[in-house]
Image (spheres, rainbow, N blue to C red):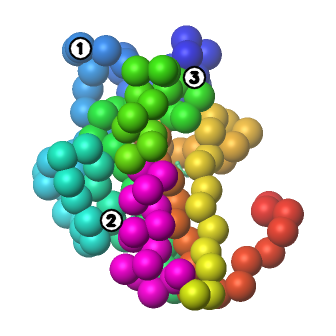
Amino acid sequence: MDNFLLQAGAWCVKYGDEMEKTLFQKIADKEIPSTMVYEDDLCVAFRDITPVAPVHVLLVPRKPIPSIGAATAEDAELLGHLMLKVGEIARAEGLAEGGYRTVLNTGVDGGQTVPHLHIHIIGGRSMQWPPG
Ligand code: AMP
């Protein structure tokens, strides 16, 4: 976690009580506009500003967990909730039949650019493997 926060640098001051809001918290709190497709008490889902496919939604817990690697046992129920929402959102976006990809980028090598756990839900075209 310390390493991650060092890497996160300018984005995330501290993971704790006095943390500065992340970009995705500001979106969840409607301080930054987005195209929201789903929200509840625990999470929000909105369209990615730079979509890589016809459907590209980000599913984000309201809790600012920096990455999946920073989640703890305390987050188990929340993570389960997110997993179930993936299928619901994919169905609502018309992706259930054709299939889709879910991505959790983690840290620098994983290509993570926003240090607030988020699940990419990407679909509407055929995907390649391995990813770049
Ligand atoms: P990652 O690189 O996995 O951390 O993903 C961060 C994602 O956030 C990228 O796909 C960005 O296009 C997306 N993103 C950044 N800023 C915004 C924004 N204001 N609204 C919606 N998506 C955003």
Q: Between marks 3 and 1, how big is the CA–CA gap?
A: 18 Å
Q: Between marks 2 and 1, how big is the CA–CA gap?
A: 26 Å
Residue 8, above or below 81: above
| Residue identified by numbered label 2 | 46
| Type of the residue with mark 2 | Phe
| Mark 2 within 8 Å of ligand 1, using the beta carbon | yes
11 or 110: which is nearer to us? 110
**Mark 3 falls on what kind of element?**
helix
**Mark 1 falls on what kind of element?**
loop
| Residue identified by numbered label 3 | 4
| Mark 1 within 8 Å of ligand 1, using the beta carbon | no
Instruction: Count neighbours of disc 3 (C-alpha within 10 A) and say few if under 14, some if 14 to 19, many if 20 or more.
Output: some
Q: How many marks?
A: 3
| Residue identified by numbered label 1 | 17
In the picture, residue 77 is in which quadrant? top left
Instruction: Count neighbours of disc 2 (C-alpha within 10 A) and say few if under 14, some if 14 to 19, many if 20 or more.
Output: many
Residue 85, above or below 1: below
Compare marks 2 and 1 and give the one earlier in the sequence.
Answer: 1
33 or 81: which is nearer to us? 81
Residue 105, above or below 88: above
Instruction: Count neighbours of disc 1 (C-alpha within 10 A) and say few if under 14, some if 14 to 19, many if 20 or more.
Output: few
Q: Position of residue 26 (x, y in %)?
A: 22, 46
In the picture, residue 131 is in which quadrant? bottom right
Q: Position of residue 119 (x, y in %)?
A: 50, 53
Compare marks 2 and 3 and give the one earlier in the sequence.
Answer: 3
Magenta residues?
82-96
